Structure formats: structure tokens, C-alpha cells
Amino acid sequence: MFTGMTDLGLQLTVDGPVARVVLDRPEVRNAQTPAMWSALSDFGTSLPPEVRLVVVSGKGQSFSAGLDRNLIMGEPVDGQEPLLTLGAKPAPELQELISHFQAGFSWLRRPEIVSIAAVQGHAVGAGFQLALACDLRVVTPDAKFSMREPALGLVPDLGGTQPLVQLVGYSRALEICLTSRWVEADEALQLGLANIVVPAEELAGTVKDLSEALLTPLVGAVRETKALLLGASDRSYQDQLKAEREAQARRLKELLAARG
């Protein structure tokens, strides 16, 4: 078992097939910083191959209040640049920097792992996008999602726009983003943002039960199925049939090889 605690407000652990990411800045509702995104990216790229499941949660009463307010207001945090000063960088450098930020989230979509967000309280901005980066979301009745970036004159740029549209459709996603309104737990369940709503005292147990169920199928079947589903909306029906054929052929060959 690997257990790591960073001074950035993250707890990162690996225990066999399960990795855990805990946002650990409860005094600021688990507000995030670019340094945390960099650490998340490094964690994702360094996962041992036996990891099949990742659980993301927040310590305390909130999942994450989004980007640290001090960075938004123009104040540095632990030597990290305020948000608006990044606009002074040359365009290629700025886009490369944002790409690096995105990498802290995008690894959760990799086909070889399934990711679960355990969400309680606020999931705002970057917090909302972190939950969206996960494949599944288990939430408590007090969970509240909001995409605040447009209200600040910005866009959601941490990979949250595509899964949001895939989950709720274009028009609802547009309305949620441009109004920056709250989407509470019951509506999140209705829209498909949440897979299940459970009482706070049952959150950990429900995530554990779901994790065990997700670890039951063979790893190859999970990897191929997730890849098929992730790409389905971008393929024509005929291309999806072809992708299914190819994936099944790979699975049959792997199963036969495993029998020796």
C-alpha cells in the first residue's frame, strides 16, 4: 500500500487495485490550486498497472469550492501566479500551461480505470469539473453543483464541457454554464449528473459497495467496454459496430491466451 500526503492539500493513496484522491483543505472548502492539478497529473501518470479504480472525495463538508479564491482575486498562493496575470503570457505558452492544468483531470477518463466522485456539499467550478471528469458520481442530499467560470468572464477549461453535454444535453449544459446556477442533488439525479443520492452517513459504504461491484468484471472487459462507451457519441452507428467487433475479437483472443 502506498500512502502519500502532499503539502498542497491532497491525500493520495494506492491500495492494490484501488487508488484514492482526497482533497484535504477543509478550511477553504477544498479550494484548488494549479499546484494541486500538477500533483494530480503526476499521480495519474505514476499509477501502477494493477490500479483499476479511483475514488475522488473531499475532506470535510464540501467536495470542492473550485479554484482558490485568492488566486481569482489576484493574490498569489504559495508562490503560484494569480489567475488573470496568466493572460500576459504568449499564447503558445499560455495554452501549454492550460494543457498541463487539464492533465490533472483528464487521466480520470482513461479506459483502463473507472473513477468515482464521492460528492458532498459544494462542487463549484473546478470542483464541478473534477466531479465531471469521473465516470460516476455518488452524492449526498446536500450536494450542490455550479459552473462559475462564465460568471467570472472565463470558460470551463478543465475538461468539464464534453462530459456535461454528454450527460445532460447541449441546451441544458448551456443553461447551467451561462447562468452559473446551483444544481442540487435531486435535480442532478434527474438530469443524470448523479448516479445515486444517498444520506451522508451512507456515502462511504455506498462507494465501497459500488467499487467492489466495478472490480468484479475482468480488467480487459472493463477497459474495452469503457473505451467503446467513451467513443460512442463520436462514431457513426456503423463505425460503432466495427469498434465493437474489433474489441470483442481482442477479448476473445486474450481470453483464449489466458487459458493457455
Image (cartoon, grey):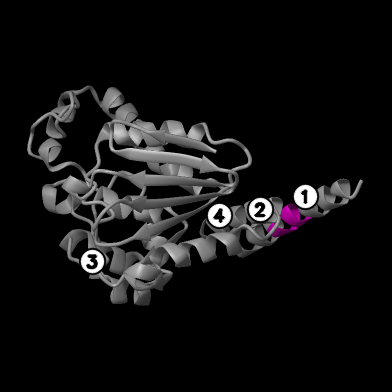
Foreground: 246 or 1? 1
Question: Which residue is denoted by mark 2 in the rendering?
Answer: 224
Circle 1 Cα neighbour tier, 10 Å, few/some/many (<14 / 14–19 / ≥20): some
| Callout 4: SS | helix
Question: Which residue is denoted by mark 3 in the rendering?
Answer: 175
The answer to which image quadrant residue 221 occupies is: bottom right
Of label 1 and label 4, which has the lower sequence position? 4
The answer to which image quadrant residue 95 occupies is: top left
Of label 4 and label 2, which has the lower sequence position? 2
Residue 243 relative to residue 258: left or right = left
Q: Amino acid at mark 1?
A: Arg
| Callout 2: SS | helix
Question: Which residue is denoted by mark 4 in the rendering?
Answer: 231
| Callout 3: SS | helix
Question: Which residue is denoted by mark 1 in the rendering?
Answer: 250
Of label 2 and label 1, which has the lower sequence position? 2
Nearest to the eye among marks 3 and 2: give it. Answer: 2
Of label 1 and label 3, which has the lower sequence position? 3
Nearest to the eye among marks 1 and 4: give it. Answer: 1
- Separation of residues labelled 1 and 3 (CA atoms): 41 Å
Of label 3 and label 4, which has the lower sequence position? 3
Q: Amino acid at mark 4?
A: Gly
